[in-house]
Image (cartoon, coloured by chain):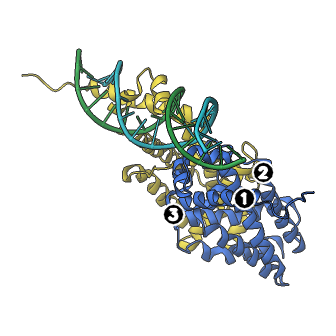
Chain colours: A blue, B yellow, C green, D cyan
Amino acid sequence: MLGTPIRDRAAERRATTRGEILAASWQIAHEQGLSQITLRDVAERVGMRAPSLYSHFASKNAIYDAMFADAWSACLEVTNATVARAPRSPRAALKLYARTFFDFAVSDLARHQLMNQRTIPGFEPSAEAYAPAVASLDHLRESLAALGVRRREDIDLYVALVGGLVDAQLANDPGGNRWGRLLNRTMDMYADNLGL
Amino acid sequence: MLGTPIRDRAAERRATTRGEILAASWQIAHEQGLSQITLRDVAERVGMRAPSLYSHFASKNAIYDAMFADAWSACLEVTNATVARAPRSPRAALKLYARTFFDFAVSDLARHQLMNQRTIPGFEPSAEAYAPAVASLDHLRESLAALGVRRREDIDLYVALVGGLVDAQLANDPGGNRWGRLLNRTMDMYADNLGL
DNA sequence: GTCTATACACCGATAGAC
DNA sequence: GTCTATCGGTGTATAGAC
């Protein structure tokens, strides 16, 4: 009687190919911009013809969808690691959280555009791709709650403050630190406003 | 001897056609999104064939360029009118300036994307189109200076605060007021931080 | 299942007739 | 200045080889 193989070599190969397609897509996004990804270019980099990509992704937007999930999963991983070594002082913790997200966002323009802006014309993330994004926001809420920040408007303000610094940095001084310098001051200002 | 005509009817007609092309482009941007503008669609709305548009604009990006100048000119006009009726109190003036820009930005998503984000793949505003944008920033600097805000990092912080609220509002609650409600509080927080 | 070949409809842009 | 015709490029779809 034939037993079930331990490893599913076909599935492994399929997952590898999927990863290669995504890696090539990220490469193009970094080199030429997020919206400059073309199926023919992706296919060439992985040694295929363009239509063959449809064996692995249902459409070009499905590739963006997987990239969106990738990006937010990476964000969730980074912030998880940070919270584990959070300092006791609420202000210090606030600054660490904000700095972690700021550095993550500023370090990759294409990724930030995919995560936080709607720069791709017809693209809307699927529910599955949104899951790690929701998890990240939940995680942020828990982390802020542990510092005593629980009201929705306070969390909204935090989101706007950090997001505003990130957007200003990327839009007006990409590669620089003109707005990154203001991050600690902004968090002190925020903590003062909350009476922390 | 033939005198020069008082009115240049050909130039007037040309300017009118240009305006019609831009109006049609804004209409499409509002209905379908900024990146969904196609030359064939624009041409159809003004009663032309697509290639005829090249008699009035050198390229599709030249249309975006004129729209960019339009948008910042409108912003400059609105903020100019606001400063003229500024209250004496620095805090009240700060709130009025911020509210004016916030309402202007939030009222038109497509316009805001064109002005402040880089959502169109190959588009970079020309120097001429940038002029009203630079004038707006100069105008903001003068207005803030009159309130006692003169350091570059203080101005940078103001830009990030207002921009962050606008982006959060448009991205997470379009048509609502969830972040608009935080504008006055944010300006008080900012004024506290500056000791105003 | 995976890939190739081919095709379609649409895009921005250009050439040349009128 | 506007037209028709056309070009190379795009995302997408499908038939069929292996």
Residue identified by numbered label 2: B178
Residue B74 in percent (x, y) is at 51, 44
| Furthest residue toward front | A1
Residue beneath disc 1: A15
Q: Where in the figure is residue B149, as x and y percent of width and height?
A: 57, 70
Q: In the image shown, does A124 or A6 lie closer to the viewer?
A: A6
Residue B75 higher or lower than A84, as above or below: above
On the image, numbered disc 3 is attached to which residue? B141
Whole-Å distance between the Cαs marked 3 and 2? 28 Å
Compute the Cα span from label 2 to label 1: 42 Å
Chain containing the residue with disc 3: B
User: What kind of residue is marked 1?
Assistant: Ala
Q: Is residue B81 visible?
A: no
Q: Is residue C9 left or right of residue A89?
A: left
Q: Residues within 10 Å of mark 2 (few under 14, many from 20)?
A: some
Q: Chain of mark 1?
A: A
